[in-house]
Amino acid sequence: MRGLGWLALTSALMLTLAACGKSAAQQHQEDVATLTSQGEKYVKEKVLEPGAAQFRNQFIGKGGAPCGEVNTKDAFGGYIGYQRYIAVARDLTLLAQDVAPEEFEQNWRQLCR
């Protein structure tokens, strides 16, 4: 009987520890949040007033790059309206206003949609 009690206790402990582990869905949500945050950081490094940047419609594109829209301020302090962005890496972050429209569209289709 003593052996069965030890087995039951060990099994219960293992089930408890397994329940503490992250599910695949939880891990995916954390990964998306991390990538999205990194994308915001890269975009903020490119704009005039990083603290004023407003983000919306953010997602991780099929290429694994954070994509979305950002509203930033111009030199006069006014918001310029939302524009799309692709944040592949610190040196590979594209804002729609910074490149030719057809070039941005090509990158958007390839990395985001």
Image (cartoon, grey):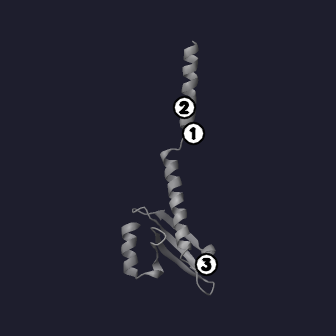
Residue 53 quadrant = bottom right
Mark 3 and mark 2 lie on one chain; the one further toward the N terminus is 2
> At label 2, which amino acid type do we have?
Leu
Q: Give the structural element (helix, strand or loop) at label 3.
A: loop
Q: Give the structural element (helix, strand or loop) at label 1.
A: helix
Q: Which residue is mark 2?
A: 15
**The label number, if any, that marks residue 20 in the structure image:** 1
> At label 3, which amino acid type do we have?
Glu
Q: Which residue is mark 3?
A: 49
- Residue at coordinates 44% horizontally, 64% vertically from top-left? 65
From this view, report whether residue 27 is shown above or below residue 6: below
How far is the residue under mark 3 from the one under mark 2? 50 Å
The one nearer the camera, 77 or 38, is 38
**The label number, if any, that marks residue 8 in the structure image:** none
Local crowd size for mark 2, using a 10 Å CA cut-off: few (<14), some (14–19), many (≥20) = few
Give coordinates of residue 22: x percent, y percent. Answer: 53, 44
Pick the quarter of the image with the C terminus.
Answer: bottom left
Local crowd size for mark 1, using a 10 Å CA cut-off: few (<14), some (14–19), many (≥20) = few
- Residue at coordinates 38% horizontally, 72% vertically from top-left? 107
Q: Are marks 3 and 1 in contact (CB under 8 Å)?
A: no
Give coordinates of residue 45: x percent, y percent. Answer: 55, 74
Pick the quarter of the image with the N terminus.
Answer: top right
